[in-house]
Image (tube, grey):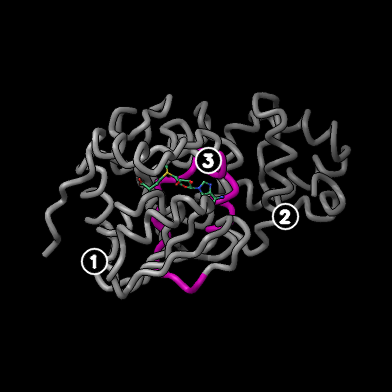
Amino acid sequence: MLPDINVVTREDLVRLTMSHRLRLNRKLSQHFVIEPLVIKDIINHVPVNSRVLEIGTGIGILTFYLASVASQVVTIEIDGRLVKIAGHVLNGLGNVSIIQGDALRVPWPQTNIVVSNVPYSITSPLIMRIIRERVPGALLTIQREVANRLAGEPGSDYYGRLSIVTQCNYVISILNTYPPDYFYPNPDVYSSLVLMVRKEPCYGDIKTLESVTNLLFRHRNRVLRWVLGKYLGSDSINAAIKVGININVRVRQLTVNELVSLTEALRPYIIGNGK
Ligand code: SAM
């Protein structure tokens, strides 16, 4: 049974920040959840008794509810002032430990799922770290636009480097979308909750796949033949044709599977390029 989800209100947070003389730092995306639905959506997708790694503790409200379903929660927060407040909020919970540090740098413990109302400034590097660490699952509240990019289909405006590398390793679902006033202080944009479930990777050498997509997507609207010719020379065009790629499509139309075949074919040309 979950404890009642009776989230701290906007007024509570105003009082709390004033009593701690806390100036919230927009650069660190210090926008705290104040809408119970967000917490319910997240908790409903955290496997019971799992080991959770939370990124961005804030004042520890989401952490508190995570601790009610998880066997263990490790939570990382960069701002020492918030670590102190969260320490009070989470006091007495035996299955929570707080680490003060930069979540992009500190070593991560073994975990079943990463959960985060993601600090916007670290969204892409955090997703890349989740992929590289082969975390089994992730539940991330991120900018709606980035969520659309993660789930982007070939040919769409959202489809690009992030979509390809993520979809190669994870099944992506957008679970819900929230308006700015579900958080305090309000961010400028809508946020979406995204579930990432690890799958058999489409390609083992993620670095080379990244290099190829980085190179090609510099000109996402150009025809593949033109981009290959410009950066890798005419032999690379022949290598692409050999593995059955239509070189007359636009780069943004290439599917993840086609990009995998291309990466394999372009390996000799790409080493040393775009890395
Ligand atoms: N989890 C809380 C919630 O849902 O209300 C807070 C979420 S708030 C959007 C993001 C939090 O991440 C802030 O508390 C911020 O200080 C912290 N943060 C920002 N950059 C960070 C980083 N590189 N490593 C760890 N925490 C970070």
157 or 113, which lies in front? 113
Q: Residues within 10 Å of mark 2 (few under 14, many from 20)?
A: many
Up-down: is 253 above or below 132?
A: above
Query: Which mark sits nearer the N-terminus, 3 or 2?
Result: 3
The CA span between labels 3 and 1 is 27 Å
Q: Is mark 1 within 8 Å of ligand 1?
A: no
Mark 3 vs 2: CB contact within 8 A: no
Q: Is residue 121 magenta?
A: yes
Residue 169's place in the image compared with 91, above or below, is: above
Please indicate whether residue 110 sits to the left or right of residue 247 in the image. Answer: left
Q: Residue at x 53, y 65 (%)?
A: 134
Indicate left or right for 22 with 12 as reference: right
> What residue sits right under mark 1 in the picture?
69
Q: Which marked residue is nearer to the observer: mark 1 or mark 2?
A: 1
Give, as a three-letter code, the residue at label 2.
Thr
Question: As rendered, which of 9 and 255 lies closer to the eye?
Answer: 9
Is the residue at mark 2 in contact range of ligand 1, meaning its CB lies under 8 Å from it?
A: no
Residue at the location (61% across, 41% down)? 161
Are circles 3 and 1 on residues that touch, CB within 8 Å?
A: no
Q: Quadrant of the N terminus?
A: bottom left
Q: Which of the 4 image quadrants contains residue 53?
A: bottom left
Mark 1 or 2 closer to N-term?
1
Q: Which residue does the numbered mark 3 point to in the structure image? A: 28
Disc 2 designates what residue? 208
- Judge depth for marks 3 and 2 and give the one in front: 3
**Closer to the camera in the image, 147 or 217:** 147
Q: Which residues are magenta?
A: 109-130
Q: Residue at x 85, y 49 (%)?
A: 269
Is 258 colored magenta in this rendering? no
